[in-house]
Image (cartoon, helix red, strand yellow):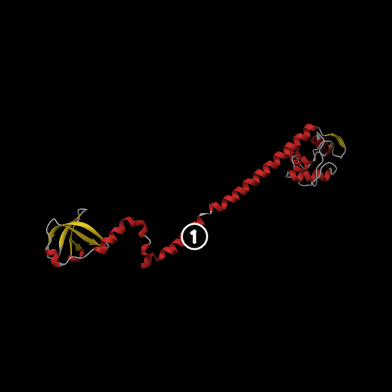
Amino acid sequence: MENQPKLNSSKEVIAFLAEKFPLCFTLEGEARPLKIGIFQDVVTRLPEETLFSKTQLRTALRLYTSSWRYLHGLKLNAQRVDLDGADCGLLEEQHVEHARKQLEEAKARVQAQRAAQRKESGDAPQARRPRPAARKATSDSKTAQPSSQPKAKAKPAPTRATTTEPAVKVTEKFRPASVADIAALKTGQNVKVRAGQSAMDATVLEIAKDGVRVQLASGLAMLVRAEHLQF
């Protein structure tokens, strides 16, 4: 016994007890209820140079008697057994009821753990939801690429419909002035100045050889050629 290695885990201690007292302890199937005071019986029956400490024995017995298969064996009219498998009296009803509650609580804990695991695994795809968004952004960028082409220029138009539509109408009706028309202009006269695709209100400040100096509604003064004026 002295040359044998010490047992480290509670499972090893239980396996040793099942080998030493097979009529009392078992590793498979439904376990039989143990005699009250079985701890002291084991300490008495085993030699002093035992392979495990008393603390290890208590822990192992606690693990053994809290297992589901042991709790299943605690039923009404069931007999407790000693180390040799001999009957040592019927189980009391309070012990049976206590075992039933322990078993229910143990099963409830397992179910709660499984539910939490399922919830975590169910939340994982939600955490990856940005991926479809990324694909959508990619597809949007593909569809937005033709915006540099003439056909796609109309896309941003809906967002500026209120501001661009009047400008388009003015552009369609805009008739450039001629040099002869400029000669008829007067200082302080209101005119239209074409800037890109829109026409802006302006006031004549000065009539020069190179064009007409006007002041926009924003206060900006600029020199405008005849083809950019309407009046």
Q: Quadrant of the C terminus?
A: bottom left
Left/right placement of residue 157 relative to residue 177 reads right
Q: Residue 5, image x and y in percent?
A: 76, 47
Q: Residue 48, image x and y in percent?
A: 80, 38
Of 85 and 114, nearer the camera is: 114
In the rendered view, tell whether residue 143 sits above or below residue 41. below
Figure disc tally: 1
Residue 164 image-quadrant placement: bottom left
Residue 155 image-quadrant placement: bottom left
The answer to whether any part of residue 149 appears in the image is no
Of 50 and 119, nearer the camera is: 119
Residue under the image location 14 percent in, 65 percent down: 181
Residue bearing mark 1: 135
Q: Residue 154, image x and y in percent?
A: 36, 63
In the rendered view, tell whether residue 82 sits above or below residue 117. above
Amino acid type of disc 1? Arg
Left/right placement of residue 184 relative to residue 217 reads left
Residue under the image location 43 percent in, 62 percent down: 141
Q: Quadrant of the N terminus?
A: top right
Q: Residues within 10 Å of mark 1 (few under 14, many from 20)?
A: few
Residue under the image location 28 percent in, 61 percent down: 169
Residue 172 image-quadrant placement: bottom left
Q: Residue 33, image x and y in percent?
A: 81, 38
Of 123 and 53, nearer the camera is: 123
Of 90 and 170, nearer the camera is: 170
